[in-house]
Image (cartoon, grey):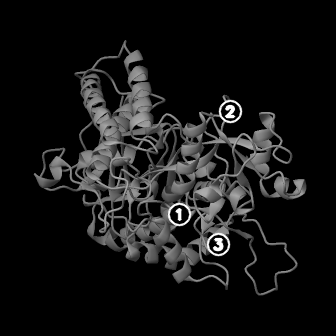
Amino acid sequence: MSQQYQHDVLVIGSGAAGLSLALTLPGHLRIAVLSKGDLSNGSTFWAQGGVAAVLDDTDTVQSHVEDTLNAGGGLCHEDAVRFTVEHSREAIQWLIDQGVPFTRDDDPAHDENSFEFHLTREGGHSHRRIIHAADATGAAIFKTLLAQARLRPNIDLLEQRVAVDLITERRLGLDGDRCLGAYVLDRSTGEVDTFGARFTILATGGAAKVYLYTSNPDGACGDGIAMAWRAGCRVANLEFNQFHPTCLYHPQAKSFLVTEALRGEGALLKLPNGERFMPRFDPRAELAPRDIVARAIDHEMKRLGVDCVYLDISHKPAEFITSHFPTVYERCLSFGIDITRQAIPVVPAAHYTCGGVMIDQHGCTDVPGLYAIGETTFTGLHGANRMASNSLLECFVYGRSAAAHIVDHLPHTALPELLPHWDASQVTDSDEDVIIAHNWDELRRFMWDYVGIVRTTKRLQRAEHRVRLLLDEIDEFYSNYKVSRDLIELRNLAQVAELMIRSAMQRKESRGLHYTLDYPDMLPEALDTILVPPTYDD
């Protein structure tokens, strides 16, 4: 039997953005935080590098802003960049106050007035401004925030809950567009429950699982983007998908990212013969922005017909390597690679979705009562290419900003009345789940082949034709059979893939992460690609 739940705030997603918002809200509010798997299944837990922020006396807000604008290929919104960077120090202080165990600076050469935590440097940054917890920053932040959330009796942490769709006044045939909550699959019962809320927040992460090779965990299926689109929200700049240059290349090493901080500390990219190649592509060499490094690796792999290139930090002292990068060291060693003596085989992999649901500085979407924060959004911060370690910062700054906006609007927002139950009377159990597995594989393969690091118009047209056929198949399946996590994710992933392809076809230039052989030059004017759902104009 399906259940009815009512909360003041419904947070869909249990990563950095969702938890920071929940913890910033006052303790008298009833809050539900949903995770579609275990609470730690999101991308936050796996983030290695750190959080970019202006923390050292030698750094400035203006420098961080300029670095971000330079990396963003002319598409960053300066107001969003400045808003994020100006709030970076208070966001980090909030994390420190929560108890996040950032790595301290034990360099005796630093005077007593310098910042007490160790700062590293990553691609595109002109200063050391990445605060980190060794090379497992995401895990340290997540564990700390989760522990704090568990101490809060007003926060319900619910695992194995998969959001199916948002409930809006329009969906129920009422006047208005307000979001009233969501229908959510409880995987333990197989029932779709109804969650009503005064405010609903999408903190569902990105959509990198749309590609065959990715650094992301299995849940990064663009759920929030697809649900927001169906509810009437605009999306922007979904053609900009960041490929992390260095993921471990090994048949048994699923989705293991080799942090950019290695290159920040002197690791070199080499061809199989030991030759460096990045200086031929950019004067910043290994510290060039990720789009340049990923394209360079892709070019060399195709030119030479090799399966990978190599990242070498073995020229550094072994103690330095094992103390600064214990996670990478242990993981590589488990595959027989000793990074103190050997180079690491690496390949690019889909990593970050730079576009998403359009929001303002408070996290508000086009639909009243619906907020979005984190990787599922388009804020204008990342432009055509996200700069390293700005993404976690965005989660905290916008999560806290959205919480403040919710508090301001509490007096004017009532809890919705009990909502209609999910209607499963016309569907049956599927006996053909092989269709889901086949379509999932087909989608991710043609997105990798046709909408990857280097694109052409013809490749995009092929992808568009295939995704429309898939969407028709999926819609028919969805209409006739009971929902499952696999079906929900496939439906969302196919929808976001179609939006990515449409966005890429509209951009008749190469800029940042979008590189097409048919339009290799950058246009003089930088414009966002904004898609408007049919319901938004109705």
Looking at the image, residue 177 sits to the left or right of residue 10; the answer is left
Residue 427, quarter of picture:
top left
Which residue in the protein does label 3 denote? 129
Label 3 sits on what residue type?
Answer: Arg
Alpha carbon distance from label 2 to label 1: 27 Å
Which image quarter holds the N terminus?
top left
The amino acid type found where label 1 is placed reads: Met
- Mark 2 and mark 1 lie on one chain; the one further toward the N terminus is 2
Q: Which mark is residue 387?
A: 1
Please tell me which residue lies in front, 33 or 151.
33
Q: CA distance from mark 2 to mark 3?
A: 31 Å
Quarter of the image where one finds residue 337: top right
Q: Position of residue 25 (x, y in %)?
A: 47, 66
What residue is drawn where x is 35% and y is 38%? Answer: 492
Location of mark 2 (residue): 250
Residue 26 visible to an observer of this rendering: no
Q: Secondary structure at mark 3?
A: loop
